[in-house]
Amino acid sequence: GAGVSQSPSNKVTEKGKDVELRCDPISGHTALYWYRQRLGQGLEFLIYFQGNSAPDKSGLPSDRFSAERTGESVSTLTIQRTQQEDSAVYLCASSLEQGAGNEKLFFGSGTQLSVL
Amino acid sequence: RKEVEQDPGPFNVPEGATVAFNCTYSNSASQSFFWYRQDCRKEPKLLMSVYSSGNEDGRFTAQLNRASQYISLLIRDSKLSDSATYLCVVKYAGKSTFGDGTTLTVKP
């Protein structure tokens, strides 16, 4: 596709359930990022992939959060045993990464997660 | 201390005004710097990169001071359409860290 695609766009779940969020980056983009944005707040870094590897997982809030990337393409962010404080917009971004001028982040429209 | 800090505002200015936003960062080894714009309920989009020599794009001027670990964005002749949240972004070792943003409202 032409841009970064995220699915679902909205997810309502019950506390304690597991959820899986998907990100399809722009074809050829080697770097992929996940951020979380709570209502009225800034972007909170979660995890970063270079290819299929995650050099920096420092932002994952707890062991309930995990992410993987396969084929240097699609990434999934999984949240186990969801809590109400997990409610937020989860944003995915991708970039060409290497070299000046290729660092621009292209964002998807996000997944709005609501935990009841 | 946060890695990237911005004055949250809000900044409320009349059309035609000049407004400046500041951002400081804590990691002196940071490599790249950017300003992004985020409209309400939308995803962030790149406004401009920031270079030590300073750079200008129309009404927008960005400046970087590595010694003071400080980034600025100047908007001249503000338009109603400039109303948004402006996010300072600092990159190190592949990781892009966002400030919490400064909200600008331009009024007629």
Image (cartoon, helix red, strand yellow):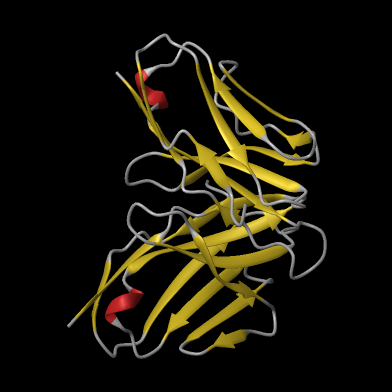
Position of residue A34 relative to residue B100, above or below, is above
In the figure, is residue A50 to the left or right of A77? Answer: right
Picture coordinates of residue B57, whole percent (x, y)? 55, 86
Position of residue A9 relative to residue A68, above or below, is below
Q: Residue at x 57, y 87 (%)?
A: B56
Number of marks in picture:
0
Q: Residue at x 62, y 29 (%)?
A: A76
In the figure, is residue A28 to the left or right of B26? Answer: right
Q: Nearer the viewer, residue B98 or B65?
A: B98
Q: Nearer the viewer, residue B31 or A67?
A: A67
Q: Picture quarter containing residue A82?
A: top left
Tell me the quadrant of the picture where the C terminus of chain A can be found: top left
Q: Picture quarter containing residue B78?
A: bottom left
Q: Residue at x 56, y 20 (%)?
A: A62
Q: Residue at x 45, y 54 (%)?
A: B43
Picture coordinates of residue A20, whole percent (x, y)? 54, 23
Picture coordinates of residue B67, whole percent (x, y)? 68, 71
Position of residue B75 relative to residue B26, above or below, is below
Picture coordinates of residue A98, whole percent (x, y)? 82, 59
Q: Residue furthest front?
A: A1
